[in-house]
């Protein structure tokens, strides 16, 4: 179903020290037995030939340099046991603890738990030539039970001494103490340069430039109150032309047990830097509220990097004591970081899944640039989403392009990476790794209108099919309009109605039973309506939905079929002023009496209506319904003649054994010889039934509606 990222499997043995396993298993009654292996938590490209990997090491963190070779053709994948080193401060002990890290040059910056019990959380700098440095220990104002999510290095100016490292995490909020335990999402920063060496007398070997603030993702309410998504799940840094101003996409979920939902928020580096230049959060004592600090902030301002840009300090060792003390007691900023436009770019509520991962690809389309968001869920699906402007680029509309089922068995997605070179999305879960193409233009149909209505920035109509759009292509007549998606203008004179219209089909429903009229548009944004026509001379009317007739996202459900339901039903999809008829179904209603169809073989599955009564009427209904279903949908017999031959053969066998076969009331007895055929118009009618049935259900086309399998 899915493409395999690598055809040949390479592995190596990583020797572990399991000295803690026996103690932990005894203390927890084997609760940790499955965790007493090496869970790899950190993998980075160290140089052209090696990876740097760290894992839990069976509750004894360990790191190693993994040789992978210069080229993919080398097929090298091995580890040098002599270069295995201690992983404390780089990987957590417990596989259930999150870790986030970034490798900059030869230095590793990691947010981990540094003890076995998971009580000492820190952001740790290791490797390289400089001494190790960390956040303040056992101070809830710095880190309070954090769950690390991601980390990035972002240049701030032309001077590399001003560059910052950002960590994203969620933690128990110190601001909410006394109001219950609340979780806030955070963004933290500190200086990445050669000069943050900690303080001279305070904060020795600790970060002196560390600051953090709240990261808000909320939906404004009509009454002025916001609905907050406080559980940060993943972060993606989208690079722009200016490396100093990337865009930050973040995935959140709600922490409430009452309201369930997920959201994606977008942040700018200008807003993030503005929050860190704002007032510091201050609290006078245990019974006081958090307020903006109103006193004098020492110079150089805490959080500023020691460089030629700000002052003449060679390192943080030369900072005055009042600067170090202020930084130690005021790591929290008062102003939070709000998303662009003060609202999420994509929200889902009242669904049975939560967002877990995000990856974003910037795509050049005919009418501008679009950020295509690939959002992973805890159900193993991937949502493909874009935002398009309505009246202006300040008023955006969210569009769900596809919903893909990546794994056969639902498994939470824990990692996603985009390869722009290969145009592939790599999706990881606890059960495996999948490779999914970024674009599948062929699934949008074979007509210009369907390709246009899809509004996928990857795809365009080339005159004959829906294919990949390339801005620098020399091919003319490439039709694409992501913003409006108007086929009336884009496909004028080129709309192939024969490709849009589906062939008519017949559907037979049993009176008093239920039936389903399936209609699934290819576009997820299309509005579906149903019309009904009793007779050809009657005008069409829209189907009225009530308790008996329900309209779902997959079609029309008639819970109890009545005789008045006989007629022609048409399914219409309307989008951006363009309406197309997807299919036309002629519904025939079969009376629930045994006198309509003769008795047929008994080896047919029977679906009974629970409302029907018992006795002989029940038996007769079972017989005629069973026989009718065999005529309509027999898996092995292709013609009604073959079915009839079996009927007459069974009747001959029954007569030979002394079993009488009674004709239906008011009908002539069928011949017993099997060679003759009764000239009954009903058999011809049933043959037409089967032809219509075959056209409806055996066309071999995959389901175009989301969620789709990624292999389709």
Image (spheres, rainbow, N blue to C red):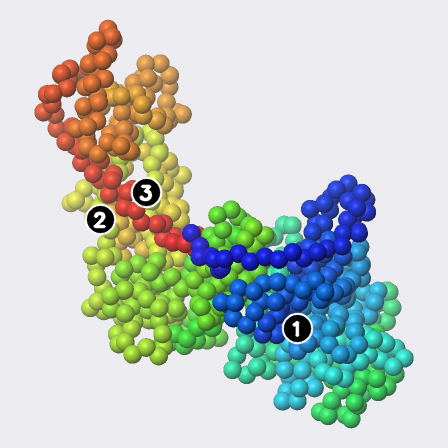
Calculate the distance from the C-alpha at mark 3 to the C-alpha at mark 1.
Answer: 56 Å
The answer to whether the residue labelled 1 contacts the one labelled 2, judged by CB atoms less than 8 Å apart, is: no
The answer to whether the residue labelled 3 contacts the one labelled 1, judged by CB atoms less than 8 Å apart, is: no
Q: Residues within 10 Å of mark 1 (few under 14, many from 20)?
A: many
Residue 27 x, y percent position in the rendering: 81, 44
Which residue carries the number 1 mark?
Answer: 103
Pointer 3 or 1: first along the chain: 1
Question: Which label belongs to residue 517?
Answer: 3
Q: Residues within 10 Å of mark 2 (few under 14, many from 20)?
A: some
Of badges 1 and 2, nearer the viewer stands 1
Q: Residues within 10 Å of mark 3 (few under 14, many from 20)?
A: some
Which residue carries the number 2 mark?
Answer: 503
- Is label 2 in a helix, a strand or a loop? loop
Residue visible at 71% across and 71% down in the picture: 109
Of badges 3 and 2, nearer the viewer stands 2
Picture quadrant where residue 118 is located: bottom right
């Amino acid at each position: 179903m899915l493409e395999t990222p690598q055809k040949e499997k390479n592995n190596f043995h990583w020797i572990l020290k399991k000295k803690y396993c026996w103690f932990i298993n005894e203390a927890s009654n084997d609760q940790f037995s499955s965790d007493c292996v090496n869970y790899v938590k950190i993998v980075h490209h160290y140089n052209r030939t090696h990876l740097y990997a760290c894992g839990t090491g069976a509750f004894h963190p360990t790191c190693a340099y993994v040789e992978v070779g210069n080229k993919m053709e080398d097929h090298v994948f091995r580890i040098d046991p002599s270069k295995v080193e201690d992983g404390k401060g780089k990987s957590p002990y417990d596989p259930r603890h999150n870790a986030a890290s970034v490798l900059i040059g030869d230095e590793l910056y990691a947010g981990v738990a540094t003890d076995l019990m998971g009580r000492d959380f820190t952001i740790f700098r290791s490797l390289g030539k400089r001494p190790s440095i960390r956040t303040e220990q056992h101070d809830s104002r710095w880190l309070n039970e954090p769950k690390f999510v991601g980390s990035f290095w972002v240049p701030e100016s032309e001077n590399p001494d001003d560059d910052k490292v950002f960590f994203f995490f969620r933690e128990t909020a110190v601001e909410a103490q006394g109001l219950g335990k609340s979780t806030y999402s955070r963004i933290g920063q500190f200086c990445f340069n050669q000069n943050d060496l900690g303080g001279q007398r305070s904060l020795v070997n600790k970060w002196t430039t560390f600051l953090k603030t709240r990261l808000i993702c909320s939906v404004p309410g009509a009454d002025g109150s916001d609905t907050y998504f406080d559980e940060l799940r993943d972060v993606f840094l989208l690079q722009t032309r200016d490396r100093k101003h990337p865009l930050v996409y973040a995935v959140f979920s709600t922490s409430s047990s009452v309201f369930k939902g997920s959201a994606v928020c977008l942040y700018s580096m200008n807003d993030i830097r503005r929050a860190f230049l704002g007032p510091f959060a201050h609290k006078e004592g245990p019974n006081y509220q958090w307020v903006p600090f109103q006193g004098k902030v020492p110079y150089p301002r805490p959080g500023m990097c020691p460089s030629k840009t700000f002052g003449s300090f060679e390192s943080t060792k030369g900072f005055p004591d009042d600067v170090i003390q202020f930084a130690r007691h005021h790591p929290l900023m008062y102003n939070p970081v709000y998303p662009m436009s003060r609202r999420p770019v994509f929200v889902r509520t009242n669904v049975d899944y939560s967002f877990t991962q995000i990856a974003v690809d910037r795509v050049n389309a005919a009418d501008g640039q679009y950020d295509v968001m690939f959002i992973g869920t805890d159900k193993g699906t991937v949502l493909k989403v874009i935002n398009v402007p309505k009246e202006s680029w300040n008023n955006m509309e969210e569009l769900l392009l596809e919903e893909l089922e990546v794994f056969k068995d639902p498994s939470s997605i824990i990692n996603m990476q985009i390869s722009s070179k290969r145009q592939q999305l790599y999706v990881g879960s606890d059960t495996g790794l999948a490779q999914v193409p970024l674009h599948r233009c062929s699934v949008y149909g074979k007509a210009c209108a369907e390709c246009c209505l899809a509004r996928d920035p990857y795809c365009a109509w080339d005159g004959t099919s829906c294919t990949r759009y390339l801005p620098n292509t020399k091919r003319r007549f490439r039709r694409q309009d992501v913003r409006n998606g108007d086929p009336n203008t884009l496909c004028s004179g080129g709309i192939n109605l024969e490709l849009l219209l589906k062939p008519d089909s017949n559907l037979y429903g049993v009176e008093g039973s239920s039936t389903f009229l399936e209609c699934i548009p290819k576009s997820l944004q299309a509005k579906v309506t149903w019309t009904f026509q009793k007779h050809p001379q009657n005008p069409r009317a829209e189907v009225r939905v009530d308790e008996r007739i329900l309209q779902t996202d997959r079609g029309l459900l008639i819970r109890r079929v009545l005789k008045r339901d006989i007629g022609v039903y048409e399914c219409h999809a309307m989008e951006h002023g363009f309406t197309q008829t997807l299919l036309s179904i002629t519904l025939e209603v079969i009376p629930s009496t045994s006198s309509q169809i003769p008795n047929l073989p008994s080896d047919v599955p029977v679906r009974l209506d629970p409302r029907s009564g018992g006795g002989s009427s029940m038996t007769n209904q079972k017989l005629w319904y069973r026989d009718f279903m065999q005529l309509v949908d027999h898996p092995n017999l292709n013609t009604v003649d073959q079915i009839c031959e079996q009927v007459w053969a069974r009747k001959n066998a029954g007569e030979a054994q002394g079993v009488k076969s009674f004709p239906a009331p008011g009908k002539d007895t069928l011949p017993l010889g099997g060679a003759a055929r009764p000239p009954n118009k009903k058999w011809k009618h049933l043959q037409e039934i089967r032809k219509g049935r075959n056209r409806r259900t055996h066309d071999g086309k995959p389901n175009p509606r989301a969620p789709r399998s990624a292999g389709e």
